[in-house]
Image (cartoon, coloured by chain):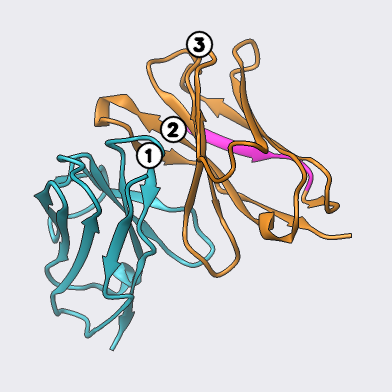
Chain colours: A cyan, B orange
């Protein structure tokens, strides 16, 4: 089973600032990495797939990078609607596995 | 647009069986996708439970494999989850989702989730 580790656990950011979230896999997942956004009381939403491709409905301020074992989600200028918990997930191997999440909160 | 909707009992007794169904709208369960269950204990992160292809092929989380069964009903365009011998640790929000193979298997559509509590 591939272990996904996200850092930091909580990120305090002011609106308009940049947020950088990290995700590390215990072994290579190539580019088979997704990021999800979850707001309170809502189901997760796909933000990024294939490590760097934005999903429908997400603006260009969201970007993903990385391959192999190290991945990054960057939100270039945080808007109020971006404060949420973000999860990474590998879909390279079964069982699929999620990171423990990074909460992006208002500073 | 594609929608998934979970349904099932919200309260299950300890040692009983949790049963949920996910109805798929505006996509065929026989499309070239996998159909997935994910759960989230209150206040905690996401746990992948398992998934099924319309042929009936399944893959499960090893930590749950001995207690779970995922099945598909092509006639009703739905898939289901059963968890046996439940305990309080199985209390969670249960989501169904589509593992979209055009995106390599990312979960692009999610149901709204249903909270299942295990309690006597």
Circle 2 packing at 10 Å, graded few (<14), some (14-19), many (20+), is: many
**In this view of the protein, which residue sits in the foreground, A102 or A67?**
A67
Position of residue B76 measured from the top left corner of the image (x, y, whole percent): 65, 16
Disc with the residue nearer the chain's start (2 vs 1): 2
Name the secondary structure under disc 3. Answer: loop
Q: Which residue is mark 1?
A: B107
Name the secondary structure under disc 2. Answer: strand
Left or right placement of residue B59 versus residue B90 in this view: left
Left or right placement of residue B110 versus residue B66 in this view: left
| Extent of the magenta region | B1-9
Give the CA distance from mark 1 to mark 3.
19 Å
The label shown at residue B55 is: 3
B108 inside magenta stretch: no
Disc with the residue nearer the chain's start (2 vs 3): 3
**Above or below for B40 versus A68:** below
B3 inside magenta stretch: yes
Q: Which residue is mark 2?
A: B98
Left or right placement of residue A35 versus residue A66 in this view: right
**In this view of the protein, which residue sits in the foreground, A62 or A68?**
A68
Contact? badges 2 and 1 (CB < 8 Å): yes
Position of residue A67 measured from the top left corner of the image (x, y, whole percent): 11, 47
Chain at numbered mark 3: B
**Above or below for A85 versus A15:** above
Asked if labels 1 and 3 share a chain, the reply is yes
- Which of discs 1 and 3 lies nearer the camera? The answer is 3
Asked if labels 2 and 1 share a chain, the reply is yes
Give the CA distance from mark 2 to mark 1.
5 Å
- Which of discs 2 and 3 lies nearer the camera? The answer is 3
* Residue lying at 77% horizontally and 44% vertically, measured from the top left: B85
**Above or below for B100 versus A28:** above
* Residue lying at 61% horizontally and 23% vertically, measured from the top left: B78
């Amino acid at each position: 089973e591939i272990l996904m580790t996200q850092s930091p656990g909580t990120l305090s950011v002011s609106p308009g600032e940049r947020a950088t979230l990290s995700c590390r896999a215990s072994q290579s997942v190539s580019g088979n990495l997704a990021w999800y956004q979850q707001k309170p009381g809502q189901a997760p939403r796909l933000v990024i797939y294939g490590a760097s491709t934005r999903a429908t409905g997400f603006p260009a301020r969201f970007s993903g990078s990385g391959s192999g074992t190290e991945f990054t989600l960057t939100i270039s200028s945080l808007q109020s609607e971006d404060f949420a918990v973000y999860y990474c997930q590998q879909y390279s191997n079964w069982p699929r596995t999620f990171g423990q999440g990074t909460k992006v909160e208002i500073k | 647009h594609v929608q998934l909707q979970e349904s099932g009992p919200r309260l299950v007794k300890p040692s009983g069986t949790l049963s949920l169904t996910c109805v798929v709208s505006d996509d065929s369960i026989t499309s070239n996708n996998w159909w997935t269950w994910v759960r989230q204990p209150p206040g905690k992160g996401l746990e992948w439970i398992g998934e099924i292809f319309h042929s009936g092929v399944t893959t499960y989380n090893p930590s749950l494999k001995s207690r779970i069964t995922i099945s598909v009903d092509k006639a009703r365009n739905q898939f289901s989850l059963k968890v046996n011998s439940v305990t309080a640790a199985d209390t969670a929000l249960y989501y169904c989702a589509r593992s979209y193979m055009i995106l390599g298997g990312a979960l692009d559509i999610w149901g709204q989730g249903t909270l299942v509590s295990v309690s006597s």
